[in-house]
Image (tube, rainbow, N blue to C red):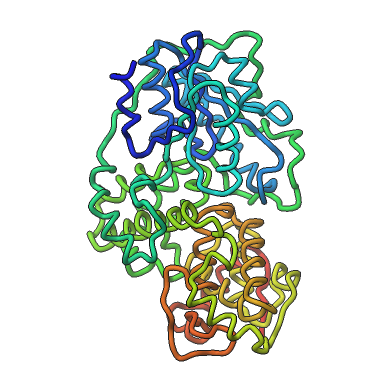
Amino acid sequence: MAEHLHRLSDPRVTVRRPGDPDPNGRAVVYWMQRAQRGTDNPALDVAIEAANALGLPVVVFLGLTPTYPNANLRHYRFMAEGFADIAEALRARRLGFIIRRSPDHDLGRFCHEAGAALVVGDENPLREPERWRADYAARLRVPFWTVDADVVVPTALLGKEQYAARTMRPRIRPLITRFLEATHEPRARVAWTAPPSLRSEQPDAAAIDGLAVDASVAPVPGLHGGPRQAMKGLQRFLRQRLTGYATNRNHPELEATSQLSPYLHFGHIGPRSVARAVRDADAPREDRDAFLEEFIVRRELATNFVRFNPRYDSLDGCEPWALRTLAAHAADARHPRYTAGQLEHAETHDPLWNAAQIQMVETGWMHGYVRMYWAKKILEWTRAPGQAFATAVELNDRYELDGRDPNGYTGIAWAIGGKHDRAWGPEREVYGTVRYMSFASTSRKFDSKRYIRRITEETGRHVTGA
């Protein structure tokens, strides 16, 4: 057995519960949570390799709880639209797929029913999912491994929290080529045959019907989740928008970015698939390099922050220099000052900010450049920096399809708390030496009027403001 499980030396793999697989086990269980796809999934590959070494089938288990932190119907519907695609990909690899809804979604109970010899899961650095993994490591009676499946370079190799992109870059770049090498995707040697007593929901969007989720935020009309839609979005980006990306990516008035972040958040597409496709695309080198810098260095810097900083979703997790300057200006007058409700409903004097908020509420996505401006203005218009941070997190997590994600928390921490940034002069009211953005300066960098018109046309909501 040991000679076949060379993957245990893979830096992607964390052994959470050691030991030998149960000799009486009937299957290897793959607990699918963050990496919701049947291809380009290192965690799934590890499960299949282990099962092949043991001469056992693989069954994939996905448990649905209605109380995933800060999630609502918008997020659940987008996620569930991927189930049919996942089931098809798993069948092609001779794997089983079991979906259970709360209150029957417990992994431990399922492992007992399925006769798990070994459990493999994917990694998720956020606080609550990490707590679930630690809990199951204590509760399960068979070995439990987790695999870092949603980054190009395994997070463990960075070792600690990185101060900024400039410290991350020289550490991660030498590793990228190694971890982008094409890998063999194993197929199960023993096909899964479900026992008649092993119950499952149908693997389609209806699986969430009857799940008592927060329905206060509606799904986005015309935007659908799933691996097929993710791949279509990637191909569209490669054909239409990768050329010119280096110049156009910071122009929110243009359709210039990949808009893949919702699919990456739900694991509907693997980061290696995206990076390889861009690397090998027929596009200018400067555009491919610019995208890969954002996609690997910056995106994985965000994962690094959340993995190694337990206060990632509060102001307390930000830089000491920023906390000092914000504290020194905490008593500065805020003019104007808006309530959380006014911000949520885009009722400010600033048409650019209102357009960004409307884009997020109506489409579930906000351009990254205006998202920086959006968060900084919440700091400027809110009573205290800590409250501003909390308000930005609440709005981002509630409406963004890619909310509740390392990228979102890191972006807010950068905008409000100077994370991965440096002090900027001159010192200003409210901001201190945290980088400042104004309507005038931001509008000079792109056509803000065109962006505002575009949001009005896309959403049907008139953008107001002074």
Q: Is residue 439 visible?
A: no
Please provide percent x and percent y for residue 410: 50, 62
Report the front residue among 146 and 321: 321
Of the 4 image quadrants, the one containing the N terminus is top left
Q: Is residue 14 left or right of residue 209?
A: left
Please provide percent x and percent y for residue 455: 58, 67
Residue 64, image quadrant: top right
> Residue at 48% across / 36% down in the picture?
122
Residue 165, image quadrant: bottom left
Please provide percent x and percent y for residue 151: 39, 46
Image height check: is 267 above or below 210? Answer: below
Please provide percent x and percent y for residue 283: 26, 56
> Residue at 64% across / 88% down in the picture?
332
What is the total number of numbered labels drawn onto the structure image?
0
Report the front residue among 129 and 194: 129
Q: Is residue 250 visible?
A: yes
Of the 4 image quadrants, the one containing the C terminus is bottom right
Report the front residue among 224 and 200: 200
Image height check: is 26 above or below 447? Answer: above
> Residue at 30% across / 60% down in the picture?
169
> Residue at 66% across / 24% down in the picture?
201
Q: Is residue 46 left or right of residue 96?
A: left
